[in-house]
Amino acid sequence: MSNAEATVTEGGAWINGLQERGREVWARRGFPSMKDEAWRDTNVSVLEKTPFVPAGVAPAKAAAELHARYTFGNAAGAEIVLVNGRFDAALSALSKLPAGVKVMTLARALAEENGLVERHLGAYAKIERHAFAARNTSHLARNLEAGVLVHVGKRKTCAKPLHILFLTVPSGEAEVTEPRVLVVAEENSESTIVETFAGNDGALYHTNAVTEIVGARSSRIDHCKLQQEGRGAYHTALMNVELAEQASFISHSLSVGSAVTRNDLEVLFNGERAEATLNGLVLANGEQHIDNHTLLHHEKGQCPSHELYKHVLNDKAVAVFMGKIFVQKDAQKTDSKQTSKALLLTDTAFMNSQPALEIYADDVKCTHGSTVGPVDANAVFYLVSRGLSLEQATHLMTYAFAADITRRIRVAPVRARMEDFMTAQHGLPQDLRITEEAAHDVALL
Amino acid sequence: MSLLEVKNLHAEVAGGGRKILKGVNLSIEKGEIHAIMGKNGSGKSTLCQVLAGREVYVVTEGQVLFNGKDLLAMAPEERAREGLFLGFQYPVEIPGVSTSYFLKAAVNEIRKHKGEPELDAMQFLKLVQSKMDLLSMDKSFMNRAINEGFSGGEKKRNEVFQMAVVNPVLGLLDETDSGLDIDALKTVSHGVNAIHQSDKSKAILLVTHYQRLLDYIVPDFVHVMIDGRIVKSGKKELALELESRGYDWVEDEVAGAV
């Protein structure tokens, strides 16, 4: 297929060079195997053995139904919808963008913002280390309609979340989509960006995403990723974030869907006093396999980073958390804290948690901790001693374990989406949630 | 028939661990307030936990009757639904779950057990309002996560508040006074007294280190626990004597009697 690869012929022909680089790396690396250190816990041989084809056009009705389930509606400041790797103008809602904030496909961006895209696209994704990202890059030209540019201008703020919604309606054939997101947050800007990946259950399909985020000096980015792929899906995704001086980045990575997921999330501190919070929640059951690799790369000094990943594993689910903190020689006064916690609801669920600290500076504070275990028996006893049944108490404690992450999410529709999912999963009523509305009810007394 | 009848109760840590209760005898009538005092490690808290059904302890000998029923045969939630309440020494923090939901679920489980109709949200809010006033709780409290971010004193006050809401016939309060400053101690004591006086049949068992609590909640009986046994019982004056003389003289007295 490589000889017949699409190219860009006018306005943005530079893309061909980037694509060629991706192709070159992919040709050299190919599919990762479990012999690769970074892939030894996650088996993606299905992706190599199965001949995947680019996803075809989804039936409009199925796309609309899927959209209805995952749209944020009025809660979003703007919503760009891509179905089976194609921009869907009818489902998207891009008319209410605040001044100075742009959300558009890469195809359109090449026409309107060519200089900006050329400067940033491919500049942050570490494709040398990430074969699937190289593969994504090798198909860039044909996927420009599956690509999104978010640009937040200097000192611009966008209070409501910008929602990028990637939907897949699987046809039954093994299909792949390769979403690409570029977020450029200029100096002193503030933005909230949500990427949702969702699809119908059943068939095998592959989503191979790359997201690049660059935060200029003193920018603030609140990012959420909701992975709600269909249960037959393979989801591989690289997100590279680069932060300039005093930039702040908050990430909530929420994985509940797919058969197999591999997320790589990397943050490069490229300026002093930048700050990052990486929180993650994995809710897995059946035979789901969810692998999160994170890298906090402290290149410059005085950057705090906080990381908390929690996993709730039922049935035969497996989760992997590999958290690396890399502190360069000049990154003095780094303050980094990493925690991974897993709740195992069965004896057959499995958690593989591995912290890795590589520190070359001498004046730093780095801590990591990891716990794996069943529901806290002391807490369950507290609840049953008040009259709740053991089953109710176990559901509540499982909910509470996960809610420790969701309560940190400041993006209301994302938090609601997750907590709805959690209450439904545990057969709990929604009124256990701590909400503004409930506070209001009490205040009326 | 006594409300609670503990006969020769022996218990140890599950899995063949340490023996902690070594023959406790205790009888509590409806309407009474009892206090158990003793040094750390004497088995006071374990007695409360065993009565409430904590599974980390196993009963190896003895019997407990609660309202004439075999308490030890009941699951912990059944004990609660039958009207036993344990106020924890270390209440648990549960993020993400509102106190309001938790308490409503508890109240309704108990009501279902008694064959009473469940309360809806508004009926429940009415019920808790008066109890919140009783313990000077802020209204925002009901929409806060259970005990999350509470100070030690707030957690204890919350325990007594919960006791007021679920309305048990026997309240076991395990060191509810520890960690309280004098104002919080007064509030909590006021709450306990009000609950006790609201219904003549209610009984309270206080476990405490300090006589100070008993200035505010006056017990009918005081028991001294040493090495897993109640070795001496008396009226409230016994607490004052323990306060001034310590526990050694009781130990000597017990040793002398053997």
Image (tube, grey):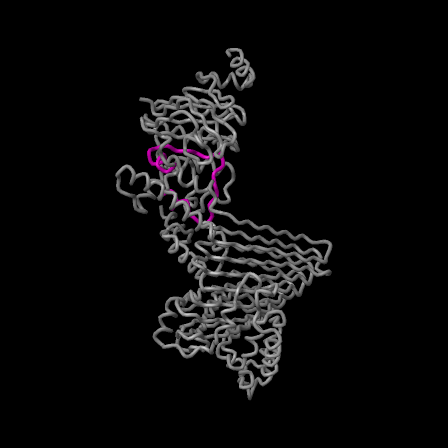
Q: Is residue A204 above or below residue A112?
A: above
| B35 in magenta | no
Q: Is residue A95 visible?
A: no
Q: Quadrant of residue B123?
A: top left
Residue A72 image point, x, y percent: 41, 66
Q: Is residue B1 above or below residue A259?
A: above
For the question of whether residue A440 can be seen, the reply is: yes
Name the one closer to the observer, A281 or A349: A349
Q: How many marks?
A: 0
Q: Measured from the top left, where is residue B133 in percent x and y?
A: 39, 37
Q: Position of residue B245 (x, y in %)?
A: 55, 16
Residue at the image point whose x is 37% and y is 42% from the top: A388
Q: Write the start and end of the magenta stretch as one range.
A: B76-103
Q: Quadrant of residue A296?
A: bottom right
Residue at the image position 54 percent from the left and 24 percent from the top:
B39
Residue at the extreme bottom of the image, as rendered: A9
Which quarter shows the C terminus of chain A?
top left
Above-or-below relation of B38 to A323: above
Residue A279 x, y percent position in the rendering: 54, 57
User: Of B230 and A110, which appears nearest the observer?
Assistant: B230
Q: Is residue A15 left or right of residue B220?
A: right
Residue located 54% across and 55% down the image: A309
In-front residue for pair B148/B129: B148
Left/right placement of residue B74 relative to residue A242 reads: left
Q: Is residue B86 magenta?
A: yes
Q: Is residue A14 left or right of residue A63?
A: right
